[in-house]
Image: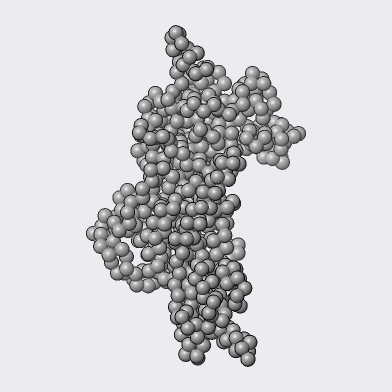
Amino acid sequence: MKLEKTIDNMELVYKKPKTLTDTPMHYCPGCGHGVAHKILMEVVNELGIQEETIGVAPVGCSVFAYDYMNIDMQEAAHGRASAVATGIKRTLPNKYVFSYQGDGDLAAIGTGETVHTINRGENILMIFINNGIYGMTGGQMAPTSLIGMKTSTTPFGREASVMGNPLKITELIAQLPGAFYVTRQSVHTTAAIRKFKKAVEASFKYQKLNKGTCFIEVVSNCPSGWKMTPVEANQWLEKNMFPFYPIGDIKVPK
Amino acid sequence: MTPENTKSEVRLMKGNEAIAEAAFRAEMKAYFGYPITPQSEVLEYLTAHINEHPGVVVLQAESELGAINMIYGASGAGARVMATSSGPGISLMQECFSYMASAQLPALIVNIQRGGPGLGTIQPSQGDYFQAVKGGGHGDYHLIVLAPASVQEMVDFVFEGFKLGEKYRNPVLMLADGALGQMMEKVTLPPKGSLPPNNAPWATTGKSKNRERNIITSLFIQPEEMEEINQKLQAKYREIQEKEVRWEELKTDDAEIVLVAFGLTSRICEKTMDLAREKGIKVGILRPITLFPFPSKPIAKLSEHVKAFFTVEMNAGQMVEDVRLSVNGKRPVHFYGRMGGMIPSPEEILQQVELISEKIQLAEK
């Protein structure tokens, strides 16, 4: 049945923005990616910048982000999304450019690109989905996996003396003069989603000021990788991830 | 635009600087690079003259990895782009060459080769032939590879490289070496405006209302689809092999021994040829100008009348494998190479030519 049929003779109260395609998302039930994609594209639609926005997808679970976002997009090699975004923004300085990356992409294999993109103050938005695990490859340890966290490559829990400590890359890059706006949000409740949306709106507006990089970390979940139900995963998120990765603004424009 | 760019001009220039000036004149939109000897003058020249070229992006990246991925992004956004490096930096770029070949992104990349393997030396070498011609990165792909033998050709191949890359939507590699990069020669610089602009309707410039969104990707998860992409790429490489082979022949008509050499080595071989002919040995030269596509057919044709081939390279014997494939056992193929940054002299190549000539005479007795 066509979507329009289901609302026949009823009042249409919500409509998917034209900045999202009709392709069904491949994400697992309860995953935060779908919500983050939707909010991002809602903002692009509401600001009326669909024609001026170019996105860069990473390698990771959101590798197919370009299938869902109805805008011009490029798919980067693992870790290189912010370098690719730099190349786009430098040659098309009047466009809005964002990268969308996971923890492995942004904070492990792409750390060099991440730090230097922000250090140059590239006028782009970087969205960083941190769920403390490599979802796409089957639940291996991420740079942001918590101490004691069990993953398929830390079956007895992450041990700092062997595997190092979880990397607070967001606090790290907030120190750089090139970072203009740095915030940590989540998308696991309605209230959290509203705050995330405000951060995305602010970031696109800031991009026109040409004053540096906007960086939004989304502390998210991975029900499949964490081996939990979506509800359990969100509870675990609040109990374990938030104390180490506290939600809130880290650097706001003066 | 400065007035001198608008007309053709003759200058005495270093190879690396000539590449940079040619790139400005070929209306390159963006350059991303990282310092490495013996090619750092490219970035230095570009940054010194950037103010004369408003709108051109020149950026020193944090690494060759960063630089080549900026190239990917800028090329995907429709810009005419160039990166330059030397062996160790080119090794880092190989990952992205594979992505760019698959996503069909044009770009000009220049390798001013130095002696390897490893950190090696900063002296000239041709040790990156395999890497340039046979892939280097993962998967089935080819770069179009141009091998200049003079500073003038470094200038010409900047224009030619942009043109070929944009025509076939494929990365182009200019494979030069440290000596060509560092030496000064007289060059004629073409005027600005002699290359048509890059037409890239596929680029991610922002989805306008009158077209579908543009996606730059190398990910095709269904094997059936990925095979189809591969078949398209292979068809493109076959077309390039049919249409774009370039080579030069010197005195091959009456030659008994044909020297096969590319780049700087071919110029050393020219001197050897003259010395050999003074001694009555009929030597000719075939110089591959495109290394991919390789001039297999002209070599095969020569193998019908010459008595032997002699490949000279500044490596342990890389292009000689393609020469042997082309000759296909019809004639002997000899090899001489110097490695690690050493340049062969015309006289030491001549000694080898004399030995080959003696062998031919013995066989004919």
User: Within the image, what quadrant is residue A98 found in?
Assistant: top left
Decide if residue B155 is on the left or right side of residue A182: left
Check the image and report above or below for B69 versus B309. above
On the rendered structure, is A8 left or right of B18? right
The quadrant of the image that shows the N terminus of chain B is: bottom left
For the point 57% across and 60% down, which residue is it? B134
Vertical placement of A133 versus B118: above or below?
A: above
- B325 vs B209: above or below: below
Q: Is residue B259 left or right of residue B52?
A: right
Where residue A147 appears, as percent x and y from the top left, is 68, 32
* Residue at x 49%, y 18% (from the top left corner): A3
The answer, for residue A62, to whether it is visible in the render is: yes
The residue positioned 55% from the left and 64% from the top of the image is B129
Residue B39 appears anywhere in the view: no
Q: Residue B253: image x %, image y %?
A: 46, 80
A68 or A220, nearer to the observer: A68
Identify the residue at horizontal 67%, vertical 30% (top origin): A225
Residue B39 pos. (x, y %): 46, 62
